Image: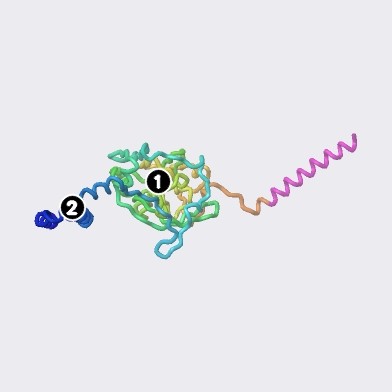
Amino acid sequence: MTYVILLGMLVHRKKKFFLNLLLVGLLVSLVLTNSPIIGTAAETTDETKTLESVEIREYEGEDLSSINAFRENSIKGPQYIDAENYTLTVSGLVKNELQLTYDEVVNGYQSFEKVVTLNCVEGWSVTILWEGILVKDLIEAAEVDPNATTAIFYAYDGYSTSVPLDYITDNKIIMAYKMNNVTLPPERGFPFQLVAESKWGYKWIKWITAIELSDNGDYKGFWESHGYSNDGNLNEGFFDPLIPEFPSWTIIPVLIAVATLTALIYRKRLTKKKLQ
């Protein structure tokens, strides 16, 4: 505005000079006042980009294992699930069966973080910061029948396992979708893995697709049906105590008997050859 007034007063003296001055002033004014014209141009050419999450290896003073420290021991190898077509089913002894998309699970419930160590029966372990939702919150939304005592988890590859409902509620068990601040990779169970703390690794089911509420406390999943303990508690070992084990002192006599029998058979064959 100031430039326009000056131009009106002095235009008859130095018309070209003040015209140039006016143009320069307008340009400076537009820059200093964040002109809508320039702002619009910036908005159309500049886009916000989301960077990938970075794995953390320390949390509240505790060292964490790498997400690559796991060994591959699934029954059919890593499973690759498309989040866009994924559905989680909560059924069985419930009043309202749930069919939830990946986004509905992740964004529809309060998220929690917890550092928990997974111990595998193969002898290795990893300590990870897990992030996910409480299984308790998920199944409560389905209104669990009072007769239900067990939660059976099913995986995309056909694997299954079960845990008592009391264990889920008393220990605030989570179903994780992140580990060490990174979305679960396919190898680690995307979209969801059960964080079955205080239980052996075969209870940490990956690639969860369904949860069935049941009154069958004796249900046996994949490894449980192969002789692993149905409880899966770390302090109780992982073999089913109902399956008889041969005491070590009985093995040596058996080996001696087998060796003796083999030697006798072999000796008779040698004797027959000499006689011939």
* In-front residue for pair 9/201: 9
Instruction: Name the residue type under label 1.
Output: Phe
Measure the alpha-carbon separation of dots 2 and 1: 73 Å
The residue at the far top in this view is 276
Q: Which residue has dot 2 on it?
A: 16
Q: Residue at x 51, y 48 (%)?
A: 240
Q: In the rendering, at what x and y percent does residue 21 appear?
A: 19, 56
Kind of element beneath mark 1: loop
Q: Is residue 274 magenta?
A: yes
275 vs 238: above or below? above
Kind of element beneath mark 2: helix
Please state, as top left, top right, bottom left or bottom right, where the C terminus lies in the image: top right
Q: Which residue has dot 1 on it?
A: 192
- Residue 170 in view in this figure: no
Determine the main secondary structure of the stretch shown in magenta. helix
Residue 260 falls left or right of residue 3: right
Q: In the rendering, at what x and y percent does residue 122 appear?
A: 55, 51
- Residue 252 in view in this figure: yes
The magenta segment is 252-276
Q: Callout 1: 10 Å neighbours few (<14), some, many (20+)?
A: many
Instruction: Name the residue type under label 2.
Output: Lys
